[in-house]
């Protein structure tokens, strides 16, 4: 069976609300896209919302802008709130990441016996890992590497 892989090089599709968020948009453009939905400004260059994506996973999504460079969207951060235990969250995210992007391009040993996974695309990368941050912390990000044509 052929699994269709989603390529995040041009942006990211949120399922609920149904919004496609392209890389390189401004904070104002993001606010306009979410004008009928809850979007929280956490600090300059960082917004969050509760949504569904990654083939049905309900989670929090953070939007990181590069205010010091050009003020455009450069990274998406995924997390669960409230957060289940690390093992449950890690398994849930990995399942949904593989359902969305297929098998990782790179897998290597990681912190706390959780493998570190990376999906590489021409203009973006997806990262899922655990790292030490005052205790083990899960890291799920999609980063724009360079703007797609």
Image: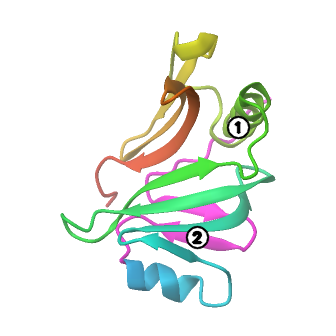
Seen at 63% across and 74% down, the residue is 19
Circle 1 sits on which residue? 93
Compared with 87, 113 (above or below) is: above
Q: Which region shows up in magenta? A: 1-26
Whole-number angstrom distance, CA of label 2 to CA of label 1? 20 Å
Q: Main secondary structure of the magenta part?
A: loop
Horizontal side, residue 131 vs residue 36: left or right:
left
Horizontal side, residue 27 vs residue 4: left or right:
left
The quadrant where residue 27 appears:
bottom left
Is the N terminus in the top left, top right, bottom left or bottom right quadrant?
top right
Circle 2 sits on which residue? 20
Residue 147, position as x, y percentages in the image: 30, 58
> Could you tell me which secondary element the residue under label 2 belongs to?
strand
Residue 24, position as x, y percentages in the image: 34, 68
The 10 Å Cα crowd at callout 2, few under 14, some 14 to 19, many 20 or more, is few
Seen at 59% across and 77% down, the residue is 39
Horizontal side, residue 45 vs residue 21: left or right:
left
């Amino acid at each position: 069976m052929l699994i269709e892989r989603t390529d995040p090089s041009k942006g990211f599709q949120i399922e609920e609300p149904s919004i496609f968020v392209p890389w390189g948009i401004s904070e104002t453009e993001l606010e306009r896209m979410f004008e009928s939905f809850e979007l929280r400004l956490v600090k300059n260059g960082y917004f969050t919302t509760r949504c569904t994506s990654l083939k049905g996973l309900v989670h929090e999504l953070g939007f990181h802008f590069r205010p010091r460079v050009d003020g455009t969207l450069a990274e998406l951060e995924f997390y669960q709130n409230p957060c289940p235990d690390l093992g449950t969250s890690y398994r849930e995210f990995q399942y949904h990441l593989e359902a969305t992007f297929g098998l990782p391009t790179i897998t290597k040993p990681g912190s706390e016996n959780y493998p570190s996974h990376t999906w590489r695309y021409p203009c973006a990368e997806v990262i899922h890992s655990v790292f030490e941050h005052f205790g083990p912390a899960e890291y799920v990000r999609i980063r724009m590497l360079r703007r797609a044509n």
